[in-house]
Image (cartoon, grey):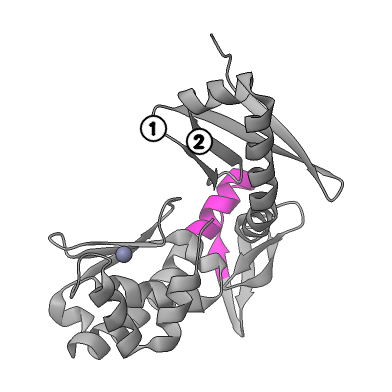
Amino acid sequence: MEISEPIIFKYILDGKDWEVTVVLKNKLGYTFKLDKNGKFVLYISKLWFNRILKNPNERNKLDKNIIKWLPRMIVHKDILEFNFEERYFYLWGVKTEFHILKSFVYFKEGDKLHYVKINRQNKEYIIKAINNKLEEIIYDVAKEYTDYYFKLLFNTTLADVKYKISSKEVTTYWGKHFYRKKEIIYNLSLVHYDKKYLRATALHEVNHFKFPKHGQKFWNNMAKFDYEYYKIDRDKKMS
Ligand SMILES: [Zn+2]
């Protein structure tokens, strides 16, 4: 049977309409994600999808799961979404207003005032300019935390191990380390959440230098060095 794409499932929650875009995959099973454009996407195997089309009970079960997921994802969407029209975004878990003043955008991070120079006035350009600033902001904090955990776990510093850290817009992980390349990548989205999540991610990634895989030893070591942030890391979820 031929299915025409895009396939959209619609749900009503708190009197609001929510759309879920269905993407067919060859991989078995299904996963549900919020993509970086703030769209809800259901990745589902073709096999499973065909089953759902034929069997209303299967469709019902899937709908129930989606309705369970959606409220949690809507919270993420609120935090991740750049609300240009109302002039705010989230910075370290705090709703942060920004103002456009001729060729500058400014916003506050605690007591600190950030200025971003803008050469154009269109929405896409301004969001991009603010995002570049957010990359600088997350870099400094990520560096501080990564350094802290290198000292705590290895009694060395980031500079000594010549480690490169960076942040990128990704959807599938909070942090990632590349042993050979000597690099840690943090998800740029972390800048929108409370700082404790970035710190927990730093602990996690630095701990990978002792234990590349997620075994019992990996978790034990994290818990031993910083139980509070070990707990935050274990509880945090992107979806
Ligand atoms: Zn890991």
Query: Is residue 109 depicted above or below 178 in this figure?
Result: below
**Residue at 55% across / 23% down in the picture?**
51
Residue 66, by quadrant, is top right
Measured from the top left, where is residue 177 in percent x and y? 25, 63
Give whichever of 234, 198 is nearer the camera: 234
The answer to whether the residue labelled 1 contacts the one labelled 2, judged by CB atoms less than 8 Å apart, is yes
Could you tell me which secondary element the residue under label 2 belongs to? strand
Query: Is residue 124 depicted above or below 147 in this figure?
Result: above
Name the kind of residue labelled 2 in the image.
Tyr
Give whichever of 221, 161 is nearer the camera: 221
Q: Which residues are magenta?
A: 115-132
* Earlier residue among tags 1 and 2: 1
Q: Is residue 97 left or right of residue 151?
A: right
Please tell me whether residue 131 belongs to the stretch shown in magenta. Answer: yes
Measured from the top left, where is residue 108 in percent x and y? 63, 76
**Residue at 39% across / 27% down in the picture?**
26
Pointer 2 residue: 43
How far apart marks 1 and 2 lie (CA) works out to 9 Å
Name the kind of residue labelled 1 in the image.
Lys
Regarding residue 143, the answer to whether it shows in the image is no
**Label total for image:** 2
Ligand 1 in which quarter: bottom left
